[in-house]
């Protein structure tokens, strides 16, 4: 470990994905997205493209407040040990239109 | 108590959120009680809120487990909020600064609720009741009351300002019952739950000023009757029984691909007043939208709707329809539909005045905004546009020229736009009699206004109801004339008035040659069943 204990290991990963969900970022997709994000240690942020602010992808209130409409482009950014896996998993979830999985 | 409240059988009307009938004890559910709560030291307050959050979360999770399916998914949103550090962080920070737990919690939630309520999207607005549900459950727990159930008898007609989903799930619906809300929305989570369970529900009743022992709730016509007389109960039961018999067989027919009569396919489309009419359970079985009225756009508090507001409404309907045709009627204001800032005041005879297309041509500034929004929406799907109250071919051409100009203007601005097919409503007898003079790709017979003008009866005057008979030979002769011309000319022709949804009129309409009818979504099943009955050796032809 370096002295910079607040700085996570590894680089910042950013990817974009189109929100194909019919109704946009509504309650069910937002719950699924934040639940999945919470499974990772990484710090994960999300924003609707062109928005100025990144918001915490683990906060369902904030993700709903994105008001992201269908066909908007979401940018997902993560830093930390499992950042790469986190971004890949979240991009897959959005691209696959939030499929139902087991409990 | 005023005298009115003592009259038995007071009736209220709202909007349908879930169809069906309920007759049972009347139960009024009051809002959350604002009991006093004495706050402790900040550390006690923090502990109290944490305990309340855990207790509320546990109860919601238990409800979700018991309910399963859609209900569980809806409640998951509330559970996720209880675990949201971005939401709770500021609440606990405020408590550390000396704010009582209940105030810190309700302020944070109220802020979120206000945010959802101000959203333009009705779906997001409806989420505010999920948040209010969560707020109140935690507050009840903090006040030492509340995670308990409401103690409502089975089979009751439950009346409330708005009922949150978790309270809906606390109620025992196994013995039926119904739900009547003063506010609420057909797109709320609780409406989805009610539809999924077949619980009749009506919303937006305004207020119900009276307590009652029993109530009748009719989800089909969106009415609530309190302390009904035995006569009202008898009528309600007859209506309910006949609806149940009809729906059982009609709904099965609805799922079959197409209605046909005499070997020809009959296309059944729907009339909608506003976008969320598409939420009706039967709307999905329609062959398209035969009439989308646009006057609802004129009712906003913000004045006349701008181009984007209109575009979004048209676009969402076209998206819903996919490849199916959608016929949108331009503003039909005037007559019995005055609009401040648009229609002309003080006309001696507004039904014979500047209304429909006449008004739009007189106000090209307002009309141009609608035509631009329609031209943009037309890019999305199978859009047709029709003008109401057309008397002469010159009016159609004048309207079409404005439309062509709007499309050219949009294209010069680099905005995608297209000129849809432009047809006319046939509701003025002069237009019906001279239909061959109109160069239109389709005609839609507006039988309500046509009957009013043909029989010279104000259709809002109840004492003339027996004279304004849609089956008057003059009406049938005009309908046949229009239909014959359209079929010869290769133009489309349909009928979108109340006649189309009236089983009594359907044999005559088919005999006149109509093969396309547009009806309210709630009439779709009955109409399809009627046509099916005629085809199978019924009283048709």
Image: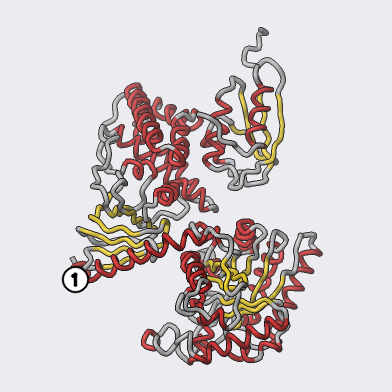
User: Residue at the location (46% across, 75% down)?
Assistant: B503
From the viewer's side, name the closer residue of B378 and B291: B291
Res. B233 image quadrant: bottom left
User: Residue at the location (24% across, 43% down)?
Assistant: B151
Res. B431 image quadrant: bottom right
Counting the numbered discs, the total is 1
User: Residue at the location (76% across, 60% down)?
Assistant: B416
Q: Secondary structure at mark 1?
A: helix
Q: Which residue is mark 1?
A: B3
From the viewer's side, name the closer residue of B407 and B431: B431
Label 1 packing within 10 angstroms: few (<14), some (14-19), many (20+): few
> The N terminus of chain B appears in which quarter of the rendering?
bottom left
Q: Where is residue B97 shown, x and y percent of the image?
A: 40, 27
Q: Where is residue B119 shown, x and y percent of the image?
A: 53, 50
Query: Most extreme residue toward the front, as rendered?
Result: B537
From the viewer's side, name the closer residue of B292 and B122: B292
Q: Where is residue B215 shown, x and y percent of the image?
A: 26, 60
Residue B495 seen in this snapshot: yes
Q: Chain of mark 1?
A: B
User: Residue at the location (59% across, 31% down)?
Assistant: A57
Q: Left or right of B322: which side holds B109?
A: left
Q: Left or right of B426: which side holds B217?
A: left
Res. B387 image quadrant: bottom right
Residue B294 seen in this snapshot: no
Vertical position of residue B144 compared to residue B114: above or below = above
What's the colour scheme?
secondary structure
From the viewer's side, name the closer residue of B265 and B149: B265
Q: Where is residue B17 shown, x and y percent of the image?
A: 42, 57
Vertical position of residue B396 compared to residue B144: above or below = below
């Amino acid at each position: 470990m370096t002295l910079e204990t607040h700085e996570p290991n590894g680089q910042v990963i950013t990817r974009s994905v189109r929100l194909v969900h019919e109704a946009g970022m509504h309650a069910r997709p937002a719950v699924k997205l934040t639940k999945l994000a919470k499974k990772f240690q990484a710090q994960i942020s999300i924003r609707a493209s062109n928005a100025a602010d990144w918001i915490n992808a683990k906060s369902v209130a904030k993700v709903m407040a994105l008001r992201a409409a269908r066909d908007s482009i979401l940018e997902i950014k993560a830093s930390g040990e499992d950042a790469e896996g986190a971004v890949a998993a979240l991009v897959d979830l959005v691209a696959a239109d939030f499929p139902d999985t087991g409990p | 108590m005023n005298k009115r409240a003592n009259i038995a059988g007071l009736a209220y009307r709202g909007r349908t959120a879930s169809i069906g009938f309920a007759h049972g004890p009347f139960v009024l559910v009051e809002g959350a009680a604002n009991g006093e709560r004495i706050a402790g030291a900040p550390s006690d307050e923090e502990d109290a809120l944490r305990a309340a959050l855990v207790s509320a979360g546990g109860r919601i999770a238990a409800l979700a487990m018991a309910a399963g399916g859609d209900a569980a998914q809806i409640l998951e949103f509330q559970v996720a909020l209880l675990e949201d550090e971005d939401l709770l962080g500021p609440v606990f920070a405020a408590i550390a600064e000396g704010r009582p737990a209940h105030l810190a919690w309700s302020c944070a939630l109220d802020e979120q609720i206000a945010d959802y309520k101000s959203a333009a999207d009705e779906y997001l607005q409806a989420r505010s009741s999920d948040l209010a549900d969560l707020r109140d459950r935690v507050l009840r727990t903090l006040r030492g009351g509340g995670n308990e159930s409401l103690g409502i008898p089975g089979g009751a007609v439950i009346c409330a300002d708005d009922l949150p989903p978790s309270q809906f799930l606390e109620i025992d619906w196994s013995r039926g019952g119904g739900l009547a809300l003063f506010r609420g929305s057909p797109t709320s989570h609780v409406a989805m739950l009610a539809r999924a369970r077949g619980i009749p529900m009506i919303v937006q009743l305004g207020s119900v000023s009276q307590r009652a022992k029993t109530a009748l709730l009719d989800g089909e016509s969106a009415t609530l009757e309190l302390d009904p007389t035995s006569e009202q109960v008898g009528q309600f039961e007859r209506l309910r029984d006949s609806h149940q018999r009809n729906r059982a067989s009609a709904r099965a027919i609805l799922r079959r691909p197409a209605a046909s009569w005499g070997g020809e396919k009959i296309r059944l489309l729907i009339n909608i007043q506003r976008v969320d009419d598409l939420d009706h359970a039967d709307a999905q079985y329609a062959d398209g939208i035969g009439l989308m009225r646009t006057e609802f756009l004129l009712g906003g508090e913000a004045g006349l709707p701008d181009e984007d507001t209109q575009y979004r409404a048209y676009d969402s309907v076209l998206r819903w329809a996919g490849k199916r045709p959608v016929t949108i009627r331009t503003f039909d204001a005037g007559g019995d539909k005055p609009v401040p800032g648009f229609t002309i005041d003080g006309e001696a005879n507004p039904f014979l005045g500047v209304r429909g297309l006449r008004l739009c041509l007189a106000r090209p500034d307002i009309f141009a905004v609608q035509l631009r929004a329609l031209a943009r929406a037309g890019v999305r799907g199978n859009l047709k546009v029709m003008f109401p109250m057309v008397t002469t071919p010159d009016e159609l051409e004048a309207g079409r020229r404005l439309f062509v100009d709007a499309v050219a203007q949009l294209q010069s601005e680099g905005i995608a736009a297209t000129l849809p097919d432009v047809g006319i409503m046939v509701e003025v007898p002069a237009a019906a009699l001279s239909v061959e003079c109109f160069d239109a790709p389709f005609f839609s017979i507006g039988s309500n206004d046509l009957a009013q003008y043909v029989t010279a009866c104000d259709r809002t005057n109840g004492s003339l109801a027996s004279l304004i008979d849609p089956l008057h030979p003059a009406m049938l002769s005009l309908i046949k004339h229009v239909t014959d011309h359209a079929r010869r000319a290769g133009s489309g022709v349909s009928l979108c008035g109340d006649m189309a949804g009236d089983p009594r009129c359907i044999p005559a309409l088919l005999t006149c040659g109509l093969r396309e009818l547009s009806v309210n979504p709630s009439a779709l099943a009955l109409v399809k069943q009627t046509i099916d009955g005629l085809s199978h050796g019924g009283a048709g032809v």
